[in-house]
Amino acid sequence: MTSPDTIHSNTHHGHCLCKAVTFSARNPSEHIGVCHCTTCRRWGGGPFMSVDCGQDIEFQGQEHIGVYQSSDWAERGFCKECGSHLFYRLKHNQQYIVPAGLFDSGPEATFDHQVFIDEKPHYYSFANDTKNMTAAEMYALFNSSSDS
Protein backbone atom coordinates (compact mmCIF):
# COMPACT_ATOMS: atom_id res chain seq x y z
CA MET A 1 0.00 0.00 0.00
CA THR A 2 1.29 3.48 -0.89
CA SER A 3 1.33 6.07 1.87
CA PRO A 4 0.07 9.62 1.23
CA ASP A 5 3.64 10.88 1.68
CA THR A 6 4.81 8.60 -1.13
CA ILE A 7 2.15 9.97 -3.45
CA HIS A 8 3.01 13.54 -2.45
CA SER A 9 6.76 13.22 -2.05
CA ASN A 10 7.05 16.92 -1.28
CA THR A 11 4.77 16.83 1.78
CA HIS A 12 6.10 18.55 4.87
CA HIS A 13 4.65 18.34 8.36
CA GLY A 14 4.66 20.65 11.32
CA HIS A 15 2.92 21.60 14.53
CA CYS A 16 2.42 24.27 17.13
CA LEU A 17 4.38 24.34 20.38
CA CYS A 18 1.94 22.14 22.32
CA LYS A 19 1.15 19.87 19.30
CA ALA A 20 -2.61 20.45 19.63
CA VAL A 21 -2.51 21.62 16.00
CA THR A 22 -0.56 19.76 13.34
CA PHE A 23 -0.43 20.30 9.60
CA SER A 24 0.64 18.74 6.33
CA ALA A 25 1.68 21.03 3.49
CA ARG A 26 2.15 19.67 -0.01
CA ASN A 27 4.63 21.40 -2.28
CA PRO A 28 5.41 24.40 -0.08
CA SER A 29 7.58 27.09 -1.59
CA GLU A 30 11.32 26.57 -1.62
CA HIS A 31 11.73 30.19 -0.55
CA ILE A 32 11.62 31.74 2.91
CA GLY A 33 10.48 35.33 3.11
CA VAL A 34 10.54 37.86 5.89
CA CYS A 35 7.89 40.49 6.50
CA HIS A 36 8.87 43.61 8.44
CA CYS A 37 5.43 45.26 8.49
CA THR A 38 4.24 46.75 11.75
CA THR A 39 1.40 44.22 12.04
CA CYS A 40 3.68 41.19 11.68
CA ARG A 41 6.16 42.63 14.16
CA ARG A 42 3.40 43.30 16.69
CA TRP A 43 2.03 39.80 16.11
CA GLY A 44 5.28 38.02 16.87
CA GLY A 45 7.57 40.58 18.46
CA GLY A 46 9.92 40.57 15.46
CA PRO A 47 10.03 39.92 11.74
CA PHE A 48 7.76 37.18 10.37
CA MET A 49 9.87 34.44 8.72
CA SER A 50 7.55 32.37 6.56
CA VAL A 51 6.95 29.81 3.84
CA ASP A 52 4.20 30.15 1.24
CA CYS A 53 2.16 26.94 1.35
CA GLY A 54 -0.49 28.05 -1.13
CA GLN A 55 -3.83 26.31 -0.67
CA ASP A 56 -2.52 22.74 -0.38
CA ILE A 57 -2.31 22.50 3.38
CA GLU A 58 -4.37 20.51 5.87
CA PHE A 59 -4.68 21.24 9.57
CA GLN A 60 -5.54 18.68 12.23
CA GLY A 61 -6.88 19.92 15.56
CA GLN A 62 -9.18 22.52 14.00
CA GLU A 63 -10.99 22.99 17.32
CA HIS A 64 -7.77 24.47 18.72
CA ILE A 65 -7.38 27.08 15.95
CA GLY A 66 -8.42 30.66 16.58
CA VAL A 67 -8.58 33.19 13.75
CA TYR A 68 -8.06 36.94 13.97
CA GLN A 69 -9.21 39.23 11.13
CA SER A 70 -6.07 41.38 10.93
CA SER A 71 -7.06 43.38 7.83
CA ASP A 72 -9.63 43.60 5.05
CA TRP A 73 -7.62 41.13 2.97
CA ALA A 74 -6.04 38.74 5.48
CA GLU A 75 -6.50 36.83 8.70
CA ARG A 76 -4.10 35.20 11.13
CA GLY A 77 -4.46 31.83 12.77
CA PHE A 78 -3.13 30.81 16.14
CA CYS A 79 -3.33 27.86 18.52
CA LYS A 80 -5.86 28.61 21.27
CA GLU A 81 -3.94 26.33 23.66
CA CYS A 82 -0.32 27.52 23.44
CA GLY A 83 -0.63 30.72 21.39
CA SER A 84 1.66 29.62 18.56
CA HIS A 85 1.20 31.51 15.32
CA LEU A 86 -0.08 29.06 12.71
CA PHE A 87 -0.68 31.04 9.53
CA TYR A 88 -1.31 34.26 7.72
CA ARG A 89 -4.10 33.61 5.18
CA LEU A 90 -5.07 35.82 2.25
CA LYS A 91 -8.86 35.92 2.09
CA HIS A 92 -9.29 36.36 -1.68
CA ASN A 93 -7.59 33.06 -2.61
CA GLN A 94 -7.17 31.18 0.71
CA GLN A 95 -3.37 31.25 0.34
CA TYR A 96 -1.58 30.16 3.54
CA ILE A 97 1.71 31.70 4.63
CA VAL A 98 3.12 29.60 7.50
CA PRO A 99 5.88 30.45 9.99
CA ALA A 100 9.07 28.72 8.87
CA GLY A 101 9.82 27.52 12.41
CA LEU A 102 6.69 25.34 12.63
CA PHE A 103 7.96 22.73 10.16
CA ASP A 104 9.35 19.51 11.63
CA SER A 105 12.10 19.51 9.01
CA GLY A 106 12.54 21.36 5.78
CA PRO A 107 11.28 22.36 3.45
CA GLU A 108 14.72 22.76 1.98
CA ALA A 109 14.27 26.46 1.52
CA THR A 110 16.36 29.51 0.83
CA PHE A 111 15.83 32.84 2.54
CA ASP A 112 15.64 35.09 -0.50
CA HIS A 113 13.16 37.94 -0.04
CA GLN A 114 12.05 40.61 2.42
CA VAL A 115 8.86 42.64 2.22
CA PHE A 116 7.87 45.93 3.82
CA ILE A 117 11.59 46.62 3.97
CA ASP A 118 10.83 50.32 4.48
CA GLU A 119 9.11 49.45 7.80
CA LYS A 120 12.07 47.44 9.14
CA PRO A 121 13.37 49.00 12.35
CA HIS A 122 17.03 50.00 12.55
CA TYR A 123 17.93 47.61 15.39
CA TYR A 124 18.28 44.43 13.29
CA SER A 125 19.51 43.47 9.86
CA PHE A 126 19.94 40.21 7.94
CA ALA A 127 23.19 39.48 6.13
CA ASN A 128 21.56 37.47 3.31
CA ASP A 129 21.45 39.00 -0.15
CA THR A 130 17.68 39.19 -0.78
CA LYS A 131 15.14 40.80 -3.03
CA ASN A 132 13.61 43.67 -1.05
CA MET A 133 10.17 45.19 -1.60
CA THR A 134 8.67 48.29 0.02
CA ALA A 135 5.13 48.60 1.36
CA ALA A 136 4.07 50.51 -1.78
CA GLU A 137 5.48 47.76 -4.02
CA MET A 138 3.66 45.09 -2.01
CA TYR A 139 0.33 46.95 -2.13
CA ALA A 140 0.72 47.44 -5.89
CA LEU A 141 1.45 43.74 -6.33
CA PHE A 142 -1.48 42.74 -4.13
CA ASN A 143 -3.88 45.11 -5.93
CA SER A 144 -2.87 43.80 -9.35
CA SER A 145 -3.30 40.15 -8.28
CA SER A 146 -6.69 40.76 -6.63
CA ASP A 147 -8.08 42.42 -9.78
CA SER A 148 -8.04 39.08 -11.58
Image (tube, rainbow, N blue to C red):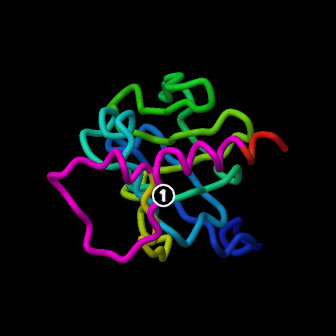
Relative horizontal placement of residue 120, taking residue 111 as reference (left or right): left
Q: Quadrant of residue 110?
A: bottom left
Residue 23 in the image: above or below residue 62:
below
Q: Measuring 30% from the left and 33% from the top, which residue is drawn there?
A: 42
Between 141 and 127, the residue placed more toward the observer is: 141
Q: Tag 1: residue type?
A: Met
Residue at the front extreme?
136
Q: Give the range drawn in magenta.
A: 116-143
Point out residue 19 in the picture as x, y percentages from the top left corner: 39, 44
Residue 58 in view, yes or no: no
Q: Reply yes or no: does residue 42 show up in magenta.
A: no
Between 52 and 4, the residue placed more toward the observer is: 52
Between 134 and 59, the residue placed more toward the observer is: 134
Point out residue 119 in the picture as x, y percentages from the top left corner: 34, 45
Residue 80 in the image: above or below residue 52:
above
* Dot 1 alpha-carbon crowd within 10 angstroms: few under 14, some 14 to 19, many 20 or more: some
Point out residue 30 in the picture as x, y percentages from the top left corner: 55, 72
- Image quadrant occupied by the N terminus: bottom right
- Image quadrant occupied by the C terminus: top right
Q: Measuring 48% from the left and 45% from the top, which residue is drawn there?
A: 135
- The residue singled out by tag 1 in the image is 133
Residue 35 in view, yes or no: yes
